[in-house]
Image: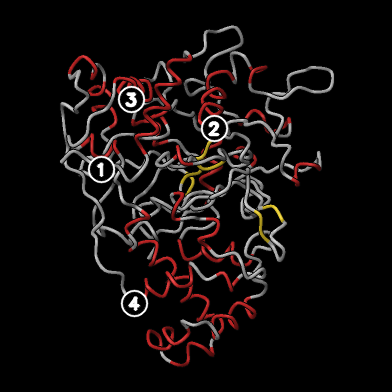
Amino acid sequence: MNSRTLWLLGAGLLVLAGAVFAVETQGLAEANSAGANPNPVHLRRPPVAPLSAMAQLGKAIFYDASLSSSGALSCASCHSPDHAYGPPNDGPVMLGGATLSRQGARAVPSLTYLERHPNFSIGPDKGDDDNIVDLAQMAALGAQSARVTKTAGAAGSAANIVPQGGLFWDGRADTLQDQALFPLLDPNEMDGGSAEVVAGKLRHAPYAQRFVELFGARVLDNQRLLIAEAMFAVARYQVEEVSFHPYTSKYDYWLEGRARLSESELRGLQLFNDPDKANCAGCHTSAPTRDGLPPLFTDHQYEALGAPRNAALEGNRDPGYFDLGVCGPHRTDIPEQTQYCGMFLTPTLRNTATRRAFFHNGVFHSLKDVLDFYNFRDTNPEKVSPRAADGTVQKYDDLPAKYRANVDVSDPPFDRHPGDTPAMTEQDEADIIAFLKTLTDGYKPEN
């Protein structure tokens, strides 16, 4: 059972009502100057219940720093519950290893809102079937098919034959169980060493008896089973613990008619959903599903955006090194599908205002930096791209030249050209940031 099906089995396909929602949000400021939603909906949130014994075991493992080589790094160290289960620091990446001096390879993603995340696939999401998809075959078909432009309110882009789903920035894990194991063994992160070392620590952990109670005494003698059950317990904790998916933002309550947006927040929502302006909702879907599930603010697809190279990353000191996302180096099963090189997963924007590192390489440190990049990448690249020693603007400098054709230049606002008017004004950007702040959990509703 994967992370997508752990919650609300049989809920059916998640069909977005984006087109209707986009129309309804147009002119909201005029429709209701007090900032209330004129068309409130009822949102279906995950059920809240006491943690199962399995989830309680997972919680103990999640906070256990002794599993790391340093003895100071746990899952919660990088995925801090006080920071929406994202990184607690302001740097582009977290530090790990035996002396907490080794850089992680990529910016730490949040662990929130993964309970409905689909498995990795190439092509349209086929729902919860268990059919094995030939990735190479689908990729070959995608290379020959026309790409549908992604705009807010347009459902057609869901049919694009592009990578989608999966966990991490490159989708190399399909389940929360698999995702938990990677950082545990990564020498740049928890650096747990071999499976044998990790199993030995689990056998002597304060919670070891819980394994026996749940799985029987023999589980401690079976190294492979012990680690698998430990990671499954961590996954159960993430699924059952409500703070991983609370849906308690101001925007959630506004959707339900229980909160009011300010004029700036309303303008930001309109700009977010406007395909002729920011077009954020083209990838970061803002509409509830037709059956009332709250929006996840991601379409789970992959994009090559051509973000600038981050000189602060040690790996980038080698001019020949490139992080190509789906093509590697961390994902290794489809490197030949070069039409996807440079693509990274579209993250949720929930709680994005709590972050200080954006994009896969953490190159941006504020929402203003991100919006400037979207706004000026194509019209005024000199504002957001580095320069070479001779002053030449180095656009797409974090991709080898042979893969730069993969960069999205069709979806608004990336359909503009040098000299064109940018999609957003400075006030537009400020209003969008105001709206993005309404996606932070922990808001206290009016009723």
- Residue 368 is situated, as x and y percent measured from the top left of the image, at 52, 26
Mark 2, residue position? 366
Q: Is residue 2 depicted above or below 44 in this figure?
A: below
- Residue 151 is situated, as x and y percent measured from the top left of the image, at 40, 25
Q: Is residue 310 depicted above or below 369 in this figure?
A: below
Q: Which mark is residue 51?
A: none
Mark 3, residue position? 265
Element marked by disc 2: loop
Mark 1, residue position? 444
Q: Is residue 328 left or right of residue 414?
A: right
Element marked by disc 4: helix
Q: Is residue 247 depicted above or below 243 in this figure?
A: above
Q: Look at label 3 and name its amino acid.
A: Glu
Mark 4, residue position? 53
How many angstroms separate mark 4 from mark 3 (CA)? 42 Å
Identify the residue shown where x is 53% and y is 48%.
Answer: 137
Where residue 370 sits, quadrant-wise, is top right
Q: Closer to the camera, 36 or 336?
A: 36
- Residue 86 is situated, as x and y percent measured from the top left of the image, at 49, 50
Q: Is residue 216 left or right of residue 247?
A: right
Quadrant position of the C terminus in the picture? top left
Q: Look at label 1 and name its amino acid.
A: Lys
Query: What is the crowding at mark 4: few (fewer than 14 residues within 10 Å), some, or many (at least 20)?
Result: some
Q: Closer to the camera, 8 or 61?
A: 61
